[in-house]
Image (cartoon, rainbow, N blue to C red):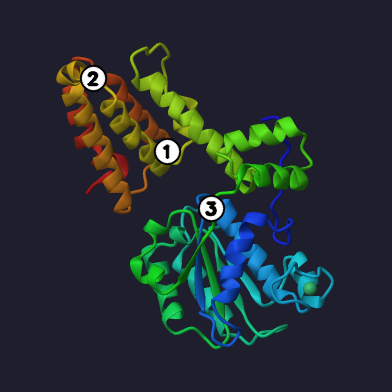
């Protein structure tokens, strides 16, 4: 990729995006310091954007000089925030190399909230990508949401609110972020990144017009990667199969992600097929869908297969669809789920 990486680090804070202002005002109007709710859920199309909103709001609240304007940048609160070491702020997020936010992380954040505020009047906990909490972790957080300690504030962010338990959602006030207007998005990204106009345009194209994701290298890579996966499905499962071997994108994908993208791809492929094609091929597509969905169920129930072997097995299954041996391969696939460490 042509664009340079822009680090989104603990104390990093860009100019407040102007499409955040409406949600910030709604937050402000939702109460005063004394009677405001203890928990908010910030929902955006993109995780990076919801995460940033939480940081912007936290930084404004931790500034000792102003209430909900740009942080002054000079007071004790702002300095501590910028050093990534503010004693009244804790950021709960997925640890590197992990797929979920675990119960131990939630427990330590509960202990944090129970301590007395050091600088200002409140302790703030950000739960970034809150849907990544395991059921046990979410349940543990629920206790804090039901009985918040004194002056704590919880800001949860998510781009997948439907994955949060309804009990958690219902105890938060929701702040929904609008999609960034294209002109504001381009201007903000150019200012933050210092990239020339064509790079800004390219990065926005790659991220569906979301400038915060465009600025965040990890998000940009993820979106780029998901495009590569889609292409590999078309190349591997479509009609013109020429290459041999598991596509690189399949081996690099987390198993959940691979299956999460593959199933809708199969559904869309069949929806767009004509009835004559489906009369001949529909049955084998349905069987393929069944096998992949079954594998996904096992993973959802806690099985943890290695990425490599899973990609290889799923690829073999997909490649054999449309061939004589497909019924046998699919039977073996289902029977072998146990051997892959995926027993029911
Ligand atoms: Zn300040």
- x and y percent of residue 171 in the render? 41, 74
Of 166 and 283, which appears nearest the observer?
Answer: 166
Q: Is residue 51 above or below residue 192?
A: below
Query: In the rendered structure, which disc, 3 or 2, sits on the residue that comes first in sequence?
Result: 3
* Residue ID for mark 2: 274
Is disc 1 surrounded by few (<14), some (14 to 19) or many (20+) residues within 10 Å?
some
Q: Is residue 283 above or below residue 306?
A: above
Name which residue lies at 39% across and 32% down. Answer: 311
* Rendered image quadrant of residue 185: top right
Query: In the rendered structure, which disc, 1 or 3, sits on the residue that comes first in sequence?
Result: 3
Horizontal arrangement in the rendering, residue 279 relative to residue 317 (left or right) = left
Name which residue lies at 77% across and 46% down. Answer: 191
Are the residues at dot 3 and dot 2 in contact (C-beta closer than 8 Å)? no
Which secondary structure, mark 1?
Answer: helix
Question: Which numbered dot is residue 307?
Answer: 1
Horizontal arrangement in the rendering, residue 285 relative to residue 193 (left or right) = left
* Residue ID for mark 3: 47
Of 25 and 128, which appears nearest the observer?
Answer: 25
- The reply to whether the residue tagged 2 has its Cβ within 8 angstroms of ligand 1 is no
Is disc 3 surrounded by few (<14), some (14 to 19) or many (20+) residues within 10 Å?
many
Which secondary structure, mark 3?
Answer: helix
Cα–Cα gap, marks 3 and 2 = 37 Å
């Amino acid at each position: 990729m042509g664009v340079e990486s822009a680090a989104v680090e603990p104390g990093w804070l860009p100019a407040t995006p102007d499409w955040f202002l409406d949600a910030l005002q709604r937050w402000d109007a939702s109460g005063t310091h004394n009677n405001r709710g203890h928990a908010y859920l910030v929902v955006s199309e993109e995780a990076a954007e919801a995460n940033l909103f939480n940081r912007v709001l936290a930084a404004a609240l931790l500034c000792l000089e102003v209430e909900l304007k740009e942080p002054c940048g000079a007071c004790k609160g702002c300095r501590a925030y910028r050093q990534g070491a503010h004693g009244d702020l804790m950021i709960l997020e997925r640890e590197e190399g992990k797929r979920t936010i675990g119960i131990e992380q939630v427990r330590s954040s509960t202990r944090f909230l129970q301590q007395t505020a050091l600088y200002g009047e409140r302790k703030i906990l950000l739960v970034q990508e809150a849907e990544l909490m395991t059921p046990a972790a979410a349940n543990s957080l629920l206790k804090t949401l039901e009985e918040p300690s004194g002056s704590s504030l919880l800001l949860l962010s998510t781009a997948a609110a439907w994955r949060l338990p309804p009990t958690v959602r219902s105890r938060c006030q929701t702040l929904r972020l609008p999609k960034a207007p294209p002109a504001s998005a381009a201007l903000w990204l150019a200012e933050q990144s210092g990239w020339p106009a064509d790079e800004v345009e390219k990065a926005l194209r790659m991220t569906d017009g979301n400038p915060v994701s465009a600025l965040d290298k990890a998000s940009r890579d993820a979106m780029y990667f998901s495009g590569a996966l889609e292409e590999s499905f078309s190349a591997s499962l479509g009609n013109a199969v020429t290459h041999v071997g598991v596509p690189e994108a399949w081996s690099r994908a987390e198993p959940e992600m691979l299956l999460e993208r593959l199933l809708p791809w199969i559904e869309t492929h069949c929806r767009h097929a004509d009835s004559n094609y489906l009369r001949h091929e529909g049955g084998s597509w349905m069987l393929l869908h069944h096998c992949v969905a079954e594998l996904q169920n096992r993973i959802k129930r806690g099985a943890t297969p290695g990425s490599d072997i899973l990609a290889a097995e799923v690829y073999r299954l997909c490649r054999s669809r449309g061939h004589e041996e497909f019924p046998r391969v699919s039977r073996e696939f289902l029977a072998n789920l146990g051997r892959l460490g995926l027993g029911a």
